[in-house]
Amino acid sequence: MGDDLSHKVTLLALVAAALTAAGAAITAGTHASPAVIGWLGAMAFFAIALATAATARGLKAADDLREPREPHGPSHPAPLPSDVTRRGVFGQIWGIGLGAFGLLAVVPFFALQRRTSKPGTAWRAGSRLVNPDGKPMRVDDLAIGGVETVFPEGAVNAPEAATLLIRLPENTADVDPARHDWVQQGNIAYSKICTHAGCPVAIYREQSLELYCPCHQSVFDVLGSGRPVSGPATRALPQLGLDIDAHGYLIARGDYVDPVGPDSWGRPT
Amino acid sequence: MMARRGERFLDDRFGSNAAVRFFLAKIFPDHWSFYLGEFALYSLVMLFGTGIWLTFVYEASSQGAYASVVALTTATPIGYLVRQVHHWSAVVFVAAILIHMARIFFTAAFRNPREINWIVGLLLLVLSSIAGFTGYSLPYDALSGTGLRIMDSVLLSIPFAGTWAADVLNGGNYPGPQLLAHLYTFHVLFIPAAIVILLSAHLGMMVYQKHTQFVDDPGHVVGRRMWPDYALRALTAFAVTVGLIIALSATLEINPIAAYGPYLDWTVPNPATPDWYAAFLDGAVRLGPAVEFQLFGHPLPALFWPGIVMPGIVLGALFAWPWIDARIAKDSAAHDVLVPASRAPWRLGVGVAFLFAAVVLTFAASDDQQALMLHVPVTALVTAYRILLPFGSIGVGMLAAILAREVASRRDEFGGDPEPERVVALRRNANGGFDTEAPNT
């Protein structure tokens, strides 16, 4: 690029940069669309790039320059005229002393242990099952094949309490015999918190009677006590025992027997 | 005029003009790939600028976080743009660091005497990823809240310390009352401070040890002066990076949290996939074995292996790589001249295998969507990815190494490389003649 051309392009680009930058600043104060403001701003920077690039092209073409590289070391400095720096037992004592200071820096962090939450969920014996709007669920509120997220009455959105209430098809009442009375007229309930990584097991597959977690694709068997069928989960979804109160509403038999959510070192199964 | 007076003022007090002149006259080797790290630096500048702005509108509490970010996004176009630029800058930042790191790896720039700078660079990558993850989590929307919950579960899977760490972070069980306040402190204080300190060390070491170069003249730095050549190119790179980030932000909406809704522990968008640079972890968690061991009567959850052990081994190998490389190459001498990837087929193979594995894990993080598209069960894809991960990586790595070796031998067959440019430095001697200094090759 010739000297002249480089100058002209640089000048034009700088003018364009100033104009677009001013445009961006003015429109930013209005309710112009973000696309307009943003593109004006972007154009300002692209114009600056053009100006610097044109200036660089206008420089006299020169060969690469060379300057010597010094070797990287070692530097072998003269020893300090001091007795204190002498190695030996003093150095070791210093080391132990500094180590103690290191402990002092680390130990306070272990005092940070705090637990504000009690184990278990908000479910109690006799808690009515309510939907996210707080409406109590009757035993026949769900159509067959239906599914609803439920909470204990008075504790909608309580952590770890989210539960999936499923109405089984009539011809599939053959659930685990040991938990036969946890199911009421085809209503069966499982924790919605995945035992793998704590995601919501949000999807009910009505055809195969499975619960599916969209995070890591664990699949749980609704008829088989919530045991994992495929995916990375290793533990069954906890099942909530159901009963019916005198007014025909679904209630819990108590809190979950099995721990809700992922396993951890500090929470033995 | 003002600049001239300021310069005089400082020079009178610090004698600073000599240092400025030294820096402006410094010679930097030049190659297009040396700008990759600069792209990261410039996006970091954008992150700080927009980040400071965002601290004035963000509310770090589980009740107010989501609403404050949605309000910011919808109230004014400039608020929307600032958040867009912040998120896009983070994407460019992490991407630029990764590509910069790949360049360092494939050209063997990490060798003696630059091992420490390789480690500092890796620490910067780790910090940037944590900065990205915490920042992505702050809006506390349905998607990022679910990501936080998974992160909490991964923390909980660590033997001995995991429960303590998760409790401290949350201030109780997930989602504890202090989770967002703690994340916010990490995101706006600890991590940026650590990045600034490590980045200063990174650049300081680079200037002090001088940049590597492709020109085969180990005794000299070959390149252009800082002023005007390099400064103009760096300015161009800066303006292009900033322009690109703003253009992306103005055009493509990123992380539309208003569409996801606020986080509740029982809702999740489907499909649920994290930001791309964290996706390899999610992929590993999807492919991990469904086994839970017992250790001293405590559970060791399945999450521990893909969530903690796998990234631990990968990071450990990366940190140790300069020494592993020196042992494989039987070369622990100091080097300032880069090795093109094609000249070291084994290193190319290792790097390609590593990248392939990362890509497989990243793709595995959306296996559910692929299963839908391909009309196959997701379990079949999991099996396929489990096989592809070890065998595909090794196979592709070996293929790359063999191809590179083949290309190198063909090059020798057809007369080899052109004779490298000979460099002879001349030095005036006391007699008025010239002495030649042989290049120490």
Image: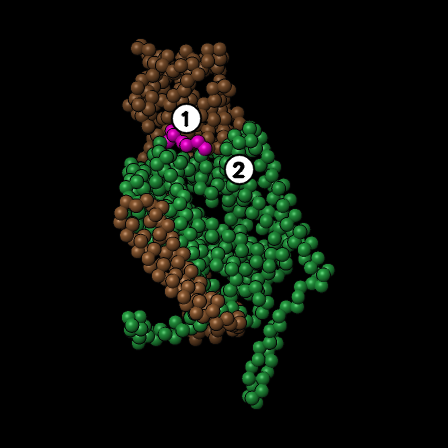
Chain colours: A brown, B green
- Magenta extent: B265-271
Image mark for residue B140: none
Residue matched to label 2: B364
Q: In this view, does B183 lie above or below B376?
A: below
Q: Residue at x 36, y 62 (%)?
A: A14
Q: Which amino acid does label 2 sit on?
A: Ala
**Can residue B381 be seen?**
yes
- Residue A98 locus on image (x, y percent): 40, 58
Q: What residue type is labelled 1?
A: Lys
Which one is in front, A20 or A183? Answer: A20
Q: Which residue is drawn at 60% across and 56% down?
A: B341
Question: Label 2 marks which chain's residue?
Answer: B
Residue matched to label 1: A192
In what quadrant of the picture does the C terminus of chain B appear? bottom right
Which one is in front, A65 or B290? Answer: A65
- Residue B248 locus on image (x, y percent): 41, 47
Q: Which residue is drawn at 59% across and 34% down?
A: B384
In what quadrant of the picture does the N terminus of chain B appear? bottom left
